[in-house]
Image (spheres, grey):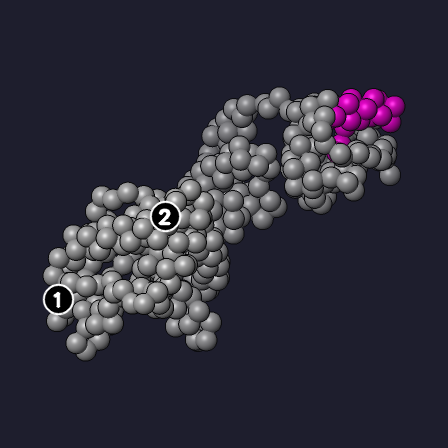
Amino acid sequence: MSIEGKRIIHFELLGSFVYGSSEGGETSKRESAPKAGKKTLSFLQYLIVNHNRNISSEELIERFWTDSGSAAPANALRHMLFKVRNLLKVMFSNQDDLLLTFSGYYAWNPNVCLELDTEQFEAACLEAGNESEDTYCELLLQAIALYRGDFLSSNDSEWVIVLRQYYRALYLDACRKVLPVLWKKDRWMEIVTVCEQAYQIDFAVEDFAAYRMRALIALGQTGQAMEIYGAFRTKMLQEFELSPGEQIEQIYALAMGLGKKELGASDIFKLVLEGDLEQRAFFCTFEMFQSIVALEKRHIARSKQKSSLVIVSLGRDVALATDTRRLERVLLEGLRSGDSVARLEAGSYILMLTGANEESAQLVMSRIDSSFHRIYRHSKACLTYRISALQTV
């Protein structure tokens, strides 16, 4: 972009704060922001973000000195503007009077054009929606490439937080939208790259783990796909005490199956036997749970032992997300390693208590109920459960 007779100043606000300028077709190298106080730098960044309009003294005072306890905010504003102008002289030594003062407001010199990566990023995201599939895909990829990190990542000012959340949401949405198009075009490596970058911004979005695993499988890298699963599962358990969803589990099962095709018989036996036995209940998808129950029915038909099914739920007056994580943790840690657990919906689980008749199941659930309220004394959850003997016919 060039504008006749104007010097162009470039600012990168996504990620680290970086600047540069161009004039007469020559572009200066990108520079990191010079050393300055946090408030001074934040003040300058606020002026940059709002470069398309006049900014009043009242707005700046309200934004930067309302809660500072300053007895003379107008003087503080004048002193800040002095520091910011000196900072701009360091950054752009060949350009005078970048910031102009008018009666009651401040504005950037109209002979200078400011280009922000945030505006280019937003424009590409919004423009993509009006284009055909090929152009749509390329515009989204351009936008994604511009997102080098969260908006002004080192600035923790209140005014930054709202914009940071907006640009982050726009970025994650662009990643979600471009992945199905890349998949349709068999562009596996680009899928992996997009998902790797998006993971750094929000690791908990399952779509990114799922597409990355699928792309790696398509590239013949099933081992890496399984590594992604392991890292994702560990992170979800650490941060949210939740296991991956059904979609991820199915892709992992596919990767495992493809990986086993490349193994010899001795390798397969070793792989099956070497896994450590976890000292807690087995958490699985509902479909896997159905298969486990079907196998158990065959077992008890021969052994004449008894097993029970239990549906356990939280009551109505709960903090759903928090209490769901709590219940899942108590179930997994409170049941035996031979018991199975599957999620039905938020706050509701189905269990198979292996070798437990209805009376024993009642005792187990009473213990789970007591354990939950002992650990989480302030929770308003009221656990309810229904027990049914596992029938062979």
* Residue 353 among those drawn in magenta: yes
User: Secondary structure under badge 1?
Assistant: strand
For the stretch drawn in magenta, what is the main secondary structure?
helix
- Residue 340 picture quarter: top right
What's the residue type where badge 1 is placed? Answer: Glu
**228 vs 164: above or below:** above
Q: Indicate the quadrant where residue 58 lies.
A: bottom left
Q: Nearer the viewer, residue 282 or 31?
A: 31
| Residue for point 21% across, 63% down | 98
Q: As displayed, is residue 195 above or below residue 366?
A: below
Look at the image and give the residue range highlighted in magenta. Answer: 350-373
First in sequence: mark 1 vs mark 2: 1
Q: Position of residue 324 (x, y in %)?
A: 68, 38
Disc 2: which residue? 72
Report the front residue among 173 and 176. Answer: 173
In the rendered view, does 129 fall on the left or right side of 245?
left
Graded by Cα atoms within 10 Å as few (under 14), some (14 to 19) or many (20 or more), the crowding at tag 1 reads few
Residue drawn at the location 40% of the way across and 48% of the way down: 65
Q: Nearer the viewer, residue 251 or 166?
A: 166
Instruction: Quadrant for the C terminus, please.
Output: top right
In the displayed structure image, the side of residue 206 where residue 310 appears, left or right: right
Q: In the image, 33: left or right of 328? A: left
Label 2 neighbour load within 10 Å: few <14, some 14-19, many 20+? few
The kind of residue on which mark 2 rests is Ala
Give me the C-alpha separation between circle 1 and circle 2: 44 Å
Report the residue marked by disc 1: 26
Q: Is residue 316 visible?
A: yes
Residue 127 part of the magenta segment: no
Q: Quadrant of the N terminus?
A: bottom left
From the top left corner, tell me how far across and down residue 83 is, in percent: 23, 50
